[in-house]
Amino acid sequence: MTDTALVGALAPAARPTVLGWFEPGTTEWHAARAAGIGGSEIAAVMGISPYESRFSLWHRKQGLLAPVEESEEMYWGKVHEPGICARFAALHPELAVSLAPTYAAAGHPWMVANPDRLIIPAPGADHPVEIVEAKTARDDHGWGKPGTDEVPVHYRAQCLWYMRVLRVPRCHVAVLIAGSEYREYVIEYDQAEADLMQAAGAEFMRTVRQHERPDIDGHTATFQTIKALPEGQDDIDIEVSTARRDRYFAALDAAKAAEDEKRAAAGHLLDEIGTGRRAVCERRTIATRTVRDGRTYSLQPARNRSTS
């Protein structure tokens, strides 16, 4: 779909509703998102969030878990956002960049968007033509060549969600890597992906309304949720099924075997490295050996472990 077809065909009634102007992380901000799905939550619905699972998000929407506590990563992302957006605006003087409120999609109030910045057609305009998202990253893992759309998948989902809610064709992603490397990426609207996310989001909200708990999965957030739900302890025995027992024991055995194999493989690799710093194969780094006081301290695997 072209920019003109997507933006120009919009009638005022199809535009999103402004819910208000909220500081991210505040009580008001959480309240505006409580009955819907925001851009940072759609990745959990899709099963691609490194921070939240469908299971943990479902329990938050049920009011059984408190909102996500602000981490150091979240804190510094919020601190750096104005500077990153200012840098984007300075590099694009031809664009009118403005602050953004929190929106709900027209006809779908559970679809919530809180973009970092709007690109408007002219100062004072009441609807954006594009949006800007500011990110921070410790390193460039998951980030491709600047100017492309190669961003971490959960950020791509967030951008597409915002574009769907605001009915705009493009999202610029400005990222500050390792505190000093600035890059820009561009995500174009994809109808098929947006349709898929909206359908998944609608189904998720149905399970929330009908109290259908998602299945337990292996996500860290799911396990943390299960740990957090019970309060107190009763000094009683609970009979569990044979299948649950056998699965648990089998997983423990598999984890021990995997850990043993990992140590053996690392030992062979370190033995072959000797006093070297890096293990390489076919001109690609496999792992890096670090040394303290003249002795091996650790063996760190390369982030990209593809053998292709």
Image (cartoon, rainbow, N blue to C red):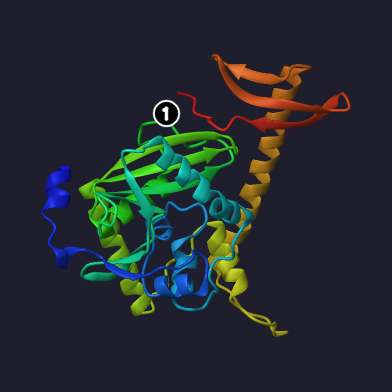
Given residues 303 and 123, the one toward you in this image is 123
Q: Residues within 10 Å of mark 1 (few under 14, many from 20)?
A: few
Query: Residue visible at 59% across and 56% down?
Result: 75
- The quadrant where residue 245 appears: bottom right
Where is residue 221 shown, x and y percent of the image?
A: 55, 61
Position of the C terminus, as image quadrant, is: top left
Relative horizontal placement of residue 299, taking residue 70 as reference (left or right): right
Q: Is residue 19 placed above or below 281 in the rendered structure?
A: below
Would residue 73 appear left or right of 259 to someone viewing this image?
left
Residue 254 appears at what percent x and percent y?
61, 48
Which is nearer the eye, 208 or 72?
72
Image location of residue 173, percent across then percent down:
40, 43
Position of the N terminus, as image quadrant, is top left
Q: Residue at x 43, y 31 (%)?
A: 144
Residue depicted at 67% across the width and 36% down the height: 262
Q: Which residue is mark 1?
A: 145
Most foreground residue, 82 or 290: 82
Instruction: Name the outermost residue toward the front.
Output: 123
Of all residues shown, which one is farthest toward the top? 283
Residue 108 appears in view: yes
- The answer to whether residue 140 is seen in the rendering is no
Where is residue 303 drawn, in percent x and y?
Answer: 57, 33
* Secondary structure of residue under mark 1: loop
User: In this picture, is 120 found above or below 300?
Assistant: below
Residue 271 left/right relative to 198: right
User: Label 1 amino acid?
Assistant: Lys
Q: Image height check: is 245 above or below 47?
A: below
Residue situated furthest right in the rendering: 293
Looking at the picture, tell me which residue is in the foreground, 105 or 283: 105
Q: Residue at x 34, y 79 (%)?
A: 209
